[in-house]
Amino acid sequence: MDALAKLIQGFQRRFKEAPSAIVRAPGRINLIGGHTDYNEGFVLPIAIEQAVWIALRPRDDHQLALYSLDLRRSAHGDLNKLVRRKGWFEYPKGMAWALQEAGYELRGWEGVVAGEIPMGAGLGSSAALEMAVGYAFATISEFEWSPSKMARVGQQAENGWVGLQSGVMDQLASAAGQADHAVLIDCRSLETTPVPLPPQLALVVMDTTTRRGLAESAYNERREQSEA
C-alpha cells in the first residue's frame, strides 16, 4: 500500500468519512550550500519524492488535532492558547504560532499525518512537516500560499518555538521544489530559480540509518561559530 492510500485509509478509520483535503510537502537533499542559508548565501537543494502527507477536515472551533500514523500518537492544541511542550507536535504548533504571529487568521482542523521521509536522516523531515501543516492551514483558512512567505514562517516556527536557529533552505526547498529540477535559492532575497536536471542524471541517496535531531545536535553551536 502506498503512502496516499495508507493515509486515506487511516483517516477513514479514525473519522468515519473521507477527508476534505489532502496536502503533501516533500523532503530534500542538498547539493551545494550546507550552513550557508542562515549566512544569506546561495544553496542548491532538490526536492525528493519522499514526502509528508496530511489528510484533514475543518473543525468548528480553534483546535488543532493530529494523529500520526507513523508514531501511532495523537496530539491537540488550542490555537488561542498554545503551550510549549516536547515532541513531534511542537512543529505543527510552531507553525500555528508563527502563522498567527505573521498576522494570519487561522481556523481549526483535524487530520491524520503520515511520512515517507526517514526521521533524523538529514532529509528535511521536520521542514516538510512544517510546510505540510502550512498547506493545511492555507487550505482550511483560505489564505494564499506563497512559498517564500511560508518558508519564512516555517523558519520562524523552528527559531522561535522549537528553539533551533535554522536557516530557510529546507522549508523553501520543500515549498518551491519542482520535479526533475534543483532549485537555486538566494537566501538573502529568497529568490528561487528552477535548475533543470539532465535527463541522463541519476541521483542516489543512501540512508546509513545514522539518526540525529537538529534540535538536540550542535547545530545552534555551529551557527554561533559561523556568525562570530
Image (cartoon, rainbow, N blue to C red):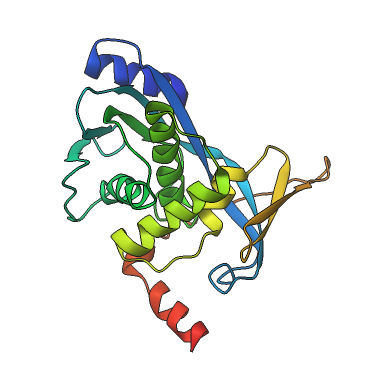
- Which residue is the extreme one toward the bottom? 228
Residue at x 41% of width, y 46% of height: 130
- Please tell me in which quadrant of the rendered image residue 140 appears: top left
Q: Position of residue 24 (x, y in %)?
A: 48, 33
Q: Examine the rendering and report whether any part of residue 206 can be seen.
A: no
Q: Position of residue 103 (x, y in %)?
A: 37, 47
Residue at x 27% of width, y 28% of height: 110
Q: How many numbered badges does the structure rendering display?
A: 0
Examine the rendered structure and indicate whether residue 208 appears above or below residue 197.
below
Observer-nearest of 122 and 133: 133
Examine the rendered structure and indicate whether residue 64 appears above or below residue 42.
above
Q: Examine the rendering and report whether any part of residue 181 can be seen.
A: yes
Tell whether 201 sits left or right of 172. right
Q: Position of residue 60 (x, y in %)?
A: 22, 22
Q: Position of residue 6 (x, y in %)?
A: 39, 22
Observer-nearest of 169 and 134: 134
- Please tell me in which quadrant of the rendered image residue 137 appears: top left
- Which residue is the extreme one toward the top? 17
- Please tell me in which quadrant of the rendered image residue 212 appears: bottom left
Q: Quadrant of the N terminus?
A: top left
Examine the rendered structure and indicate whether residue 35 appears above or below residue 193.
below
Residue at x 26% of width, y 31% of height: 108
Examine the rendered structure and indicate whether residue 50 appears above or below residue 8.
below
Residue at x 43% of width, y 82% of height: 224
Tell whether 172 sits left or right of 4. right
